[in-house]
Amino acid sequence: MTPLLLLPGMMCDARLFGPQINALSGMRPVMTVPMDRFETMQDLAKDLLVHAPPRFAMAGLSMGGILAMEVLRQAPDRVAGLALMDTNPKAETDTVKARRTPQIAAAMSGDLRRVMRDEMKPNYLADGPNTGAILDLCMAMAMDLGPEVFIRQSKALRDRPDQQETLRGFTGPALVLCGAEDTLCPLERHELMHALMPQSHLEILPNAGHLPTLEQPALTTQALMTWLETL
């Protein structure tokens, strides 16, 4: 049975995939990949490949999807399947890069909680009955990881390469999934990834923003299960 690697988003940990881990871990080996030790996507991918099984499937959300694409670029023969969720294959724009500098400075000065509360968390979710609890979980994950991880991850995202050619070369089983109300990584980015991988399945989840694993856990899990059946 092909192992599944789960790659969380920025300032998130395994708790981002809690519902999916509970549902899938009885069916195959499931591992969550930490992304806290290095400040380039290239080094994060190299570290993952050192510790990963010889062949695996990957499901990455947001920054996790960006890292998954770099892993695919470095070791395409080891990737049995790819699920990209609420992510972006393009390099970072100059506008977003410019916002990172003051955020990094704030984190360095001990102001990470404010950055997460005022600049990051409001962009994450669609309105729903569980919004408050999910935002509280996001804050807990971020504060547990801490400012040094925030700084390293910000630099890795800022300096990431464009991965459109990487996706164009992948012909294995692929899922492209996003929340219909994701404003950070909007639908058009996912339509682009689907076009780059025409064999992929595009899944758009209603009443979800940037974190459908928590906003629409049952629908996300079902989409992942259907994808995993094709491996």
Image: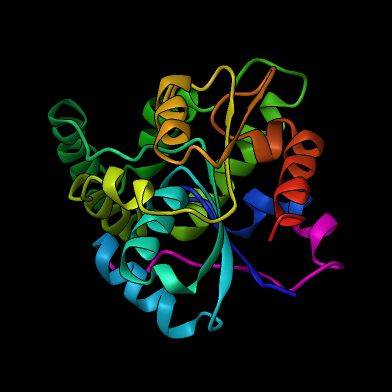
Q: Residue at 68% of width from left, 27% of height from top?
A: 132
Q: Residue at 65% of width from left, 23% of height from top?
A: 208
Query: Which region of the structure is painted magenta?
Result: 21-38
Give the percent coordinates (x, y) of residue 102.
17, 36
**Is 140 left or right of 50, judged from the image as shown?**
right
The answer to whether residue 121 is seen in the rendering is yes
Looking at the picture, the colour scheme in use is rainbow
Give the percent coordinates (x, y) of residue 90.
27, 38
Q: Main secondary structure of the magenta part?
A: loop
**Residue 35 is one of the magenta-drawn residues:** yes
Q: Residue at 33% of width from left, 75% of height from top?
A: 46
Q: Is residue 26 above or below residue 223?
A: below
Q: Is residue 164 above or below residue 229?
A: above
**Residue 5 is one of the magenta-drawn residues:** no
User: To which quarter of the image does residue 202 belong?
Assistant: top right
Q: Nearer the viewer, residue 168 or 143?
A: 168
Q: Nearer the viewer, residue 134 or 20?
A: 20
Q: Is residue 31 above or below residue 22?
A: below
**Is 81 left or right of 90, judged from the image as shown?**
right
Give the percent coordinates (x, y) of residue 142.
48, 49
Q: Quadrant of the N terminus?
A: bottom right
Q: Is residue 45 above or below residue 132?
A: below
